[in-house]
Image (spheres, rainbow, N blue to C red):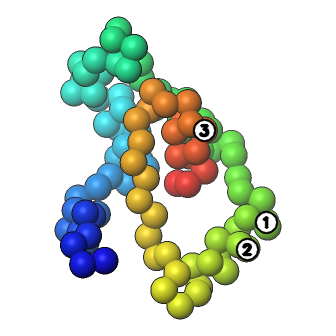
Amino acid sequence: MANPVVTPERFAAGRTFEEYLVYIASAENLRRESSQGGPRRDWSGFLRERYQKQRLSDAHVAALRWLAAQPGGPAKVLVIAEEWSSDCRRDVPMLA
């Protein structure tokens, strides 16, 4: 890609899953308007619990390891998420 939107520097400035959970619970985040216009909810406990309880199947782990081992295979994962999204609440813990 000639002009990548996500440069290595921008990727490095992102949050880890744990940092994201801390941000979700922060006063800074909770002051923001929710997607429905009301108060924002702290989803960090829910996401942390999902992360601790759910595991990828052996077949999924094997497929991801195979994919990452391919020449030019993915070495990093970028997730763009908002905790108010049910899809993100379902998928982000699995990606972590």
Q: Where is residue 33 in the image (x, y as percent from the top left)?
A: 28, 17
Of pointers 3 and 1, the one earlier in the residue sequence: 1
Which residue is under mark 2?
Answer: 62
Circle number at residue 46:
none
Task: Name the amino acid type tagged 2.
Answer: Ala
* CA distance separating discs 3 and 1: 19 Å
Frontmost residue, 63 versus 3: 3
Which residue is under mark 3?
Answer: 90
Q: Position of residue 31 (x, y in %)?
A: 24, 19
- Asked if the residues shown at circle 1 and circle 2 are in contact, with their CB atoms under 8 angstroms apart, the answer is yes
> Few, some or many C-alpha atoms within 10 Å of disc 3 (few <14, some 14-19, many ≥20)?
some
Task: Name the amino acid type tagged 3.
Answer: Arg
Which residue is under mark 1?
Answer: 58
Would you place residue 13 above or below residue 26 in this image? below
* CA distance separating discs 1 and 2: 6 Å
Residue 40 visible: no
Q: Residue at x 29, y 55 (%)?
A: 14
- Asked if the residues shown at circle 3 and circle 2 are in contact, with their CB atoms under 8 angstroms apart, the answer is no
